[in-house]
Amino acid sequence: MSYAPTTLLRLVDEGLPKNGTGVLAATKRDGRWIETSPAQFTAAAEHLAMGLRALGVRRGDRVALHSENSAEWLIADQATLSLGAVNVPIYCTQPADQIRYILENSQAVVYIVSTAALHAGVAEALPQIGSLKAVVGIRGAFAPGVTAWSDVIARGAEAANAEPGVYAAERAKAEPEDLATLIYTSGTTGTPKGVMLTHWNLASNVLSSLERMPWDIEGDRGKKILSYLPLSHVFERMLSYLYVHVGYPVWFIEHIEEMMADLQTVRPVHFSSVPRLLEKVNAAIHAKPAQLSGAQKAVMTWGLGLADRFDVEKSLGGLDKVRYALADALVFKKIRALFGGNLKAITSGGAALGREVMNFMNAVGIFCGQGYGLSETSPVIAVYSPGGLRAGSVGTPISGVEVRTAEDGEILVRGPNVMKGYFDAPEATAEVMTEDGWFRTGDVGHLDAAGYLFITDRKKELLKLSTGKYVAPQPIEGRLAASRFIEQAVVIGNSRQFATALLVVDVAALRVEFAARGTPLGDGEVLDQPGVRELIAAEVQAVNAALPHWEQVKKFSLVRRPWSIETGELTPTMKIKRRVVQERHADEIQSMYV
């Protein structure tokens, strides 16, 4: 289906009348939910826009937004776009040097920051950024030189009353090809680059993605959406426009650790996720039988085993249909209740979703599929179809988006979702665009005969063994991390004779497992306790059994602390910085090749 180019402002305007819940967004803050109605949202967006205008923001200017997910995030975005300015989102987990770089490179004129803690990390650098005209604090004037959000809103309300036609006139100037945002890439391979996305880049992605929504938009209207992925990430950002456009209220959680409890409160119909969270939830559910006894334990174990054998590509029939109906009544219904009881679907992105998790979630009655895309493609390139899941596939290309593969297997994309380029970086832009207008994704994969897209690996991350064989590390890492006992995995092998792996274990899962075996682990370092390495070796061997011999992990080393954003091994989007990991674990790696 083709769509007439439109703007994000129009998508929002079209969606507001569809929301009959009285809540456009709810923000959990300091343990309590703060609801924002559609009327409050539109008034705040107008007043903030006029307040920003009074601070000197004009069409084409960049406004940096450094905040947790909240109604204020949506309001700031809407206000910025209404002025014809450009939203520059910053991750809450971004290190100070990258924040300074983003502010300087984007030439931001206003820096909106939510809390004193986020501001503190970059406070000393702010006076040195010549383009900045103002710093606005969402939670107040918490430091010298910071103007309180409420004061900007109040000033804007006065300006709106004094000049009643200005706001509407500014909004009316918006065009589909206007620049809407600069999204800075994660920087796994170097300095972040500002991806230039227009209104139509993102709006086209909203409209095409809407065709694939796996729940009844009309029938479930009035139910809620739960959001935990950062709005600074283009995937959740695009989905936020989609949710508002179809009239669904979005509930923003405060802490990921409270998500299971928040699911009980919000009782959402949908949420988006990264695979790792689903893997952890899957592991926690599989640990439930160890907490039960007698008939309850037997029934739960039977039901989980049945779900583990489910295959999304095969239809149920005969006796299997009866078994799954019984399991649904006795086991699966209880699992769905853990998610609030209303959950129809989970959309996974950001990394490969393991076959085991996909099959399990669909078996228990929650539709779970994955998609694929990049910041440069606004982001969705391909995504599941509600009636066409294929394990290992990221689905089929969405409407208006063309996909083909180059001779070396690299996935190329063309469509209205492809960025205008990298900000102030024409050479970097030229490197990723072909002469005939296709975007080079840097990913390797293939389309099957039915049009399903399969991602093999990142082109630059393929490992070439000293034997000449190539190893794609990401699928192997995904299978390893699918184990409930393995938290993170990095496969090594470039210019080596065989593949090895660095593994971070899930300590909590190991403790549950050994307790269930009747041999609980002691209080000391888990990695040094009897049986742990043998258990992990069995998990590695299970993965190896499905791999050709040259891809098999011959040796592994257990890492004593998880990799994190704070310690520098992960990007703000939770991608592993391979070079950093390998440098920091050089001794362990070398010991595996002695």
Image: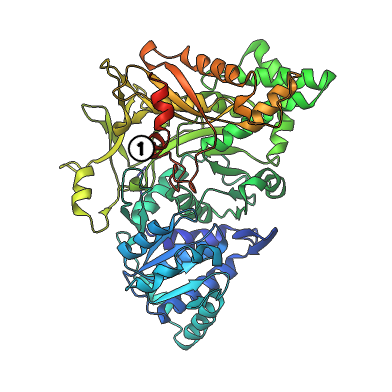
| Residue 95 visible in the snapshot | yes
Say left or right for 458 vs 114: left
**Residue 487 percent location from the top left of the image:** 55, 32
Give the side of residue 490 with respect to residue 138, left or right.
left
Q: Residues within 10 Å of mark 1 (few under 14, many from 20)?
A: few
Q: Judge whether 190 appears above or below 52 on screen.
A: above
| Closer to us: 179 or 220 | 179
> Which one is in front, 103 or 250?
103
Q: Nearer the viewer, residue 91 or 587?
A: 587
Colour scheme shown: rainbow
> Is residue 5 toward the left or the right of residue 257 in the image?
left
> Which amino acid type is marked by label 1?
Arg
Return the x and y of residue 392 as percentages of the image width and height.
45, 25
- Residue at the extreme bottom: 162
Determine which quarter of the picture holds residue 131.
bottom left
The quadrant of the picture occupied by the C terminus is top left
**Which residue in the protein does label 1 denote?**
579
Q: Residue furthest left?
A: 435
Residue 276: % across, % down: 54, 35
| SS of the residue under disc 1 | helix
Given residues 574 and 553, the one toward you in this image is: 553
Expressed as whole percent of the image width and height from the top left, the position of residue 395 reads 42, 31
